[in-house]
Image (spheres, helix red, strand yellow):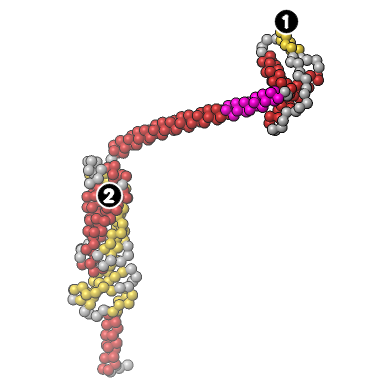
Amino acid sequence: MDFSGFDIAIIVLVALVLLVLFKGIRTIPQGYNYTVERFGRYTKTLMPGLNIIVPFVDRIGAKMNMMEQVLDVPSQEIITRDNAIVGVDGIAFFQILNAAQAAYQVSGLQNAILNLTMTNIRTVMGSMDLDELLSNRDAINERLLRVVDEAAHPWGIKITRVEIKDINPPANLIESMGRQMTAERNKRAQILAAEGLKQSQILEAEGRREAAFRDAEARERSAEAEARATQVVSEAIAKGDVQAINYFIAQKYTEALAKIGSSSNNKVVLMPFEASSLIGTLGGIGEIARGVFRGDGPSNSPRQAARPPVVRPNDN
């Protein structure tokens, strides 16, 4: 099959169009920005998606990752303000915000961030004592983040986090710190024990005071009740009520029997033979009790006073 000159021109034209499209159309993946250079000079930044450039004139310069990246900071020795040597390593998180600045303002972006972070770790932690390093890690991270982010701002990046992973003091310092912590714990334990003993003694004293107050109050109420009963009985006696006299006789009789029963000596108690006298005595006590505690007046029916028992010592 013979091709004419027109056919060859058409084929060449189609091939040229395809080559132009291939050179002029660029697809940028998500999370990346590409810089465009025209005759070696930066002109613009291509965003993710389909982009068109001038073929054979423009070319892709730097392909920058715009996602947050992690940079491992290797371990290094730091001399603290109190001349203690500790090993420190960390980690840094950064994100490129301006692709052109990150590509053309610094050569070797990750190496620059790494050296900047290590230098500031030595500066910040070297100005602190060992105790401050071990107890103020959050403050150290915050200070490092502020300093490193401010220094890296002209590079078009944002330092999102700077974290100290580990602080390794020498073995002798670890041993001395362990002894110091043990002494501090023992001291706090002794203080807490003394405070607990003091508090228990205070509570015990308060309990004794409250008990004494309650006992005094009970004795006061008992005395008031006894005085009230004595007053009522006295008034009844003044009115000529025989039951009041029986009440006093029965009370003395009961007290005498209690003393005789509590004695360790052998004795013989002679009780009255007449049961009616004893019943009359008990009835008088009941009448007086009802008159005192129920507010009823004493009974006007007179009863003959019961004869108290005669107590004789045992001849044995």
Q: Amino acid at mark 1?
A: Asn
For mark 1, what is the residue? Answer: 316
Question: Which SS does the magenta portion mostly show?
Answer: helix
Is 16 drawn above or below residue 263 in the view shown? below
Q: Which mark is residue 75?
A: 2
Residue drawn 22% across the image and 50% down it? 123
**Does residue 245 appear to the left or right of 206 in the view shown?**
right
Label 2 SS:
strand
Mark 1 or mark 2: name the one nearer the start of the chain.
2
Q: Nearer the viewer, residue 200 or 51?
A: 200
In this rendering, which labeled residue sits more in front, label 1 or label 2? 1
Residue drawn 67% across the image and 27% down it? 232
Q: Which residues make up the magenta segment?
A: 219-239
Is 279 drawn above or below residue 86 in the view shown? above
Q: Report the quarter where the C terminus lies.
A: top right
Where does residue 226 sit, x and y in percent of width and height?
Answer: 63, 26
Residue 3 magenta-drawn?
A: no
Please say whether residue 300 is visible from this viewpoint.
yes
Measured in 3D between alpha carbons, the distance from the residue under mark 1 to the one under mark 2, in whole angstroms, is 107 Å
Label tally: 2
Q: Amino acid at mark 2?
A: Ser
Based on the displayed image, in which of its 4 quarters is residue 153 positioned?
bottom left
